[in-house]
Amino acid sequence: MDRPHRLRDFLNELFGVRRTPAPPPAPAPACEHVPDLTVCPETPGPSVSEVHSVLSPDAVVIHEGDTVTGPLGGETDYSVRGCVNGDICTAGSVLVTGLVKGCVTGANITVQGGELCGDLMASEAILLEKDSLVLGKLSADIIDIAGQVKGDVHAKSRALIRSVAVLSGDLEAKSALIEPGAAIEGKVHITNCEN
């Protein structure tokens, strides 16, 4: 099985998307429910630290202590452990544990304790772990936030705002799950359109 399918299958499992009929789920905890927006106590699921971008073995690695200036592009995966001063635009995945001062565009973007000053745009998913900071807008099909975001968030499909997340900006999604304890300073808009 190739890499995009493994990540897609993992994300489908994480957000409960099923391709075949599944046995009935266990009873859910008592939830406060508004159409398409659910706030549940003690939401089960894997911690964000268990979720990682799957990078190819030939990924470009910017090592801790290294600084790259200028835009990076292509179709390869990137692992940023150091500092990038410029945009990253790739058809592959991006893993950031360091610092990026610029916009990041890719198939999947994971931020593990890193910092980004710029917008993030992913064709598939953005995963922002605890102790991560993004100063910019987020846009992807699926967005999972456990860190801090100062900017608007647009999830074309689903958004998961973890209990330790801090969002200073508006949230727009087709569906959203906001865990108790999450802080949102902005508007929450649930879209019902098919586009």
Image (cartoon, rainbow, N blue to C red):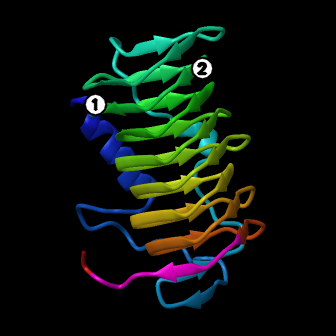
Can you identify the residue that label 1 sits on?
3
Name the mark on residue 83: 2
In the rendering, at what x and y percent does residue 43 appear? 64, 66
- Residue 93 visible within the image: no
Identify the element where label 1 is drawn: helix
In the rendering, at what x and y percent does residue 182 appear? 73, 65
Residue at image x 66%, y 75%? 186
Q: In which quarter of the image is residue 38?
A: bottom right
In the rendering, at what x and y percent does residue 152 appear? 55, 63
At label 2, counting other C-alpha atoms closer than 10 Å, the crowd grade (few under 14, some 14-19, many 20 or more) is: many
Q: Nearer the viewer, residue 43 or 142?
A: 142
In the rendering, at what x and y percent does residue 6 appear? 31, 37
Q: Which amino acid does label 1 sit on?
A: Arg
| 53 to 133, vertically: above or below | above
Which quadrant: the C terminus?
bottom left
Q: Which of marks 1 and 2 is nearer the N terminus?
A: 1
Q: Quadrant of residue 31?
A: bottom right
Q: Nearer the viewer, residue 120 or 132?
A: 120
| 80 to 169, vertically: above or below | above
**Is 92 on the left-hand or right-hand side of 153?**
left
Residue at image x 70%, y 57%? 165
Q: Which residue occupies the extreme right position in the image?
A: 181
| 42 to 66, vertically: above or below | below
Identify the element where label 2 is drawn: strand
Q: Give the extent of the magenta segment.
A: 185-193
Q: Quadrant of residue 89?
A: top left
Magenta-span inclusion, residue 11: no
Which quadrant: the N terminus?
top left
Q: Which amino acid does label 2 sit on?
A: Cys
